[in-house]
Image (spheres, rainbow, N blue to C red):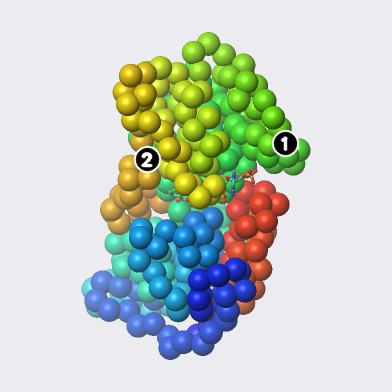
Amino acid sequence: MHVAQVTEFGGPDVLVTAEVPDPQAGPGQVVVEVAAIDTIFVETQVRAGWGTGFFPVRPPYVPGGGIAGTVGATGAGVDEWLGRRVAASIGFTGGYAERAVATAESLAPVPDEVSFTDAAALIHDGVTAHALLDRTAIKPGERVLITGASGGMGTLLVQLATAAGAYVVGTARGVLKTALVRELGADVVVDAAVPGWVERAREALGGAGADVVLDGVGGDLGLAAFALAADGGRFSGHGAPTGGFAAVDPGEARRRGVRLLGIADVQLSAAAHSNLAARALAAAASGILCPVIGATFPLVRASEAHAAIESRELLGKVVLTV
Ligand SMILES: NC(=O)c1ccc[n+]([C@@H]2O[C@H](COP(=O)([O-])OP(=O)(O)OC[C@H]3O[C@@H](n4cnc5c(N)ncnc54)[C@H](OP(=O)(O)O)[C@@H]3O)[C@@H](O)[C@H]2O)c1
């Protein structure tokens, strides 16, 4: 079968098509005939050599941890999955492939109303977005600031926070992205590329600031977003596309009574992951959640997909198709 393989750490060109033996399902496992593959920003960072302390991957490796497709073969004990439409999180590698092995525990059935492309788009972002909404327990009427609101997960967070009855302020960059976030239901969108965005966001949030900040960007922008959290509020710094998580001073957070959440709070067991995936897929089937897919690329053009993600020109996210 064909896979896209990272041959060495580097730019998008290090991601090339390779031929490898078909995977076999062991006991409790299935082989998925992959139709669509999730991509997430951090995969481009790891491919470039970032975060090797946290992500134990070394070239050559096949990236990709989120797949959707049809179960083509089953190992012992899980025959009931044969032929079913599924999505799965399979870890951090092995997903950019025509076939991939998944444990039965990690499978979420994909409703007929949901395309494989949408299912792949939701298998990580939809799960993490639901986990973040649960962890921060957003209530109707609360003021919520979402940074990186035009990204793969940001666009879902805007929809979910709006559906939860929150007053949502989003940050995005440029005319197209800010318009998208507004269309998705945000009450106010602030262009974070325009100087003075922090003051405009403060004004939009009014009063004491944001009850909840969902920061998917990190770096200086994330730190500025922390300053916009109301005393006694909640701040989730789960994103680092800038190269680092928001370096919030825990002492200051304590003094201000801001509860800090981070990437560790959205690390989920396989069972919790597949439960949240089922919720995200059900929300998509009923039209509550609509993933924004800026572009799809065939698997053999995975390097172009990575270049597109890094260009930051696309809306929402990029999905690979087989
Ligand atoms: N997806 C998941 O399941 C999951 C789980 C845990 C953590 N996270 C983290 O959450 C964050 C957001 O995920 P995502 O999937 O929504 O990512 P994404 O689609 O790539 O979105 C990232 C957003 O960050 C903004 N951004 C600001 N400065 C940036 C910079 N220097 N480089 C790149 N982007 C920048 C981009 O908006 P502009 O281009 O408009 O500025 C973009 O909207 C990532 O750090 C990811 O690792 C995701």
Q: Nearer the viewer, residue 242 or 84?
A: 242
Q: Which one is closest to the eye, mark 2 or mark 1?
A: 2
Q: Which residue is mark 1?
A: 179
Q: Earlier in the sequence, mark 2 or mark 1?
A: 1
Residue 14 is drawn in which quadrant? Answer: bottom right
What's the residue type where badge 2 is placed? Gly
Check disc 1: other Cα within 10 Å, few if <14, some if 14-19, many if 20+: some
What's the residue type where badge 1 is placed? Ala
Residue 5, placed above or below residue 87 = below
Is the CB of mark 1 within 8 Å of ligand 1?
no
What residue lies at 53% left-to-right and 11% top-to-bottom? 207
What residue lies at 36% left-to-right and 69% top-to-bottom? 102
**Numbered badge on residue 262:** 2
As helix, strand or loop, the secondary structure at mark 1 comes to: helix
**Residue 294 shown left or right of residue 112 in the figure:** right
What residue lies at 62% left-to-right and 77% top-to-bottom? 300
**Residue 181 shown left or right of residue 277 in the figure:** right
Residue 225, placed above or below residue 238 = above
**Residue 192 shown left or right of residue 157 in the figure:** right
